[in-house]
Image: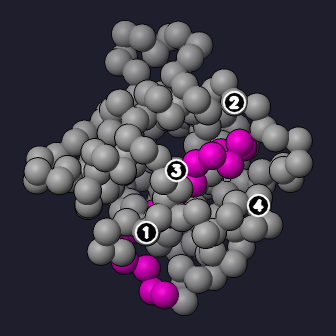
Amino acid sequence: LPISALAAATLLAGCALRPVPAELPALRTVERVDLARYAGTWHEIARYPFAIQVRRCARDTTATYRALSPTLISVVNRCQQADGSDSVAEGVARVLDPSTNARLEVSFLPAWLRWLPLGRGDYWIIDLAPDYSWVVVGEPSRRFLWILARTPQLPPVTYEAILARLPAQGYDPARLLRSPGR
């Protein structure tokens, strides 16, 4: 979930308060995520536009995950701003469903505020390459979507195959914004 700190707080508060529209199919996650394999750095390939992220993140958006425990993950989102400086947001993700590890809840609030029942957002792994080379992350309201990869670019055939599967999950591929240089 690569976004700046302000964007993250706004995003997560919005996700937590927004109900899922009744006309959308239930969002399906992958069957199982090996969190040890999932850990590491992911490059943003595409995302649904998010105003604050568009203004703050000009390029080179990444998310780095590191296991803190079997159900808690450190999240460091980083991007380069238009002026060349880095924007960094640090948070934690908590596994909501340990039987699959595919549904997480992320908070970018300061550690001393994370006990509050707000400022958290759904982070659901809805598509994942068998070799963990790319992932699609969404959330039930379908307001947010990210395509991430281990490398800064995906082969066009892989990207197109991912896009072809999105409508079945209630996502509109036409809304995706490709990350610069991707």
Q: Earlier in the sequence, mark 2 or mark 4?
A: 2
Instruction: Identify which residue is drawn at 53% across, 56% down.
Output: 48
> Can you identify the residue that label 4 sits on?
169
> Which secondary structure, mark 1?
strand
Residue 4 vs residue 42, the one in the foreground: 4
Q: Secondary structure at mark 3?
A: helix
Q: Using the image as rendered, state which of residue 36 and residue 20 is in the foreground.
A: 20
When asked about the image quadrant of residue 71, the answer is top right
Circle nearer the N terminus (3, 2)? 2
- Between circles 3 and 2, the one closer to the viewer is 2
Mark 4 to mark 1 CA distance (whole Å) = 19 Å
- Residue 154 highlighted magenta (yes or no): yes
Q: Residue 149 location in percent, x, y? A: 43, 68
Find disc 2 in the rendering and name its residue.
18
65 lies left or right of 139: left
Give the total of numbered labels.
4
Q: Secondary structure at mark 4?
A: helix
**Disc 2 residue type?**
Arg
At label 3, which amino acid type do we have?
Leu
Residue ID for mark 1: 178
Residue at position x 76%, y 58% from top? 170
On the image, the x and y values in percent for residue 153 come to: 37, 77
Residue kind at label 1, given as amino acid type: Arg
Q: Tell me the mark number nearer the camera, choosing from 3 and 1.
A: 1
Q: Which residue is mark 3?
A: 35
Q: Relative to 107, does residue 41 appear above or below in the rendering?
A: below
What quarter of the picture does the C terminus occupy? Answer: bottom left
The amino acid marked with disc number 4 is Gln
Residue 3, given in percent of the width and then of the height, sits at 37, 44
Q: Is residue 35 magenta?
A: no
Identify the magenta region: 139-156
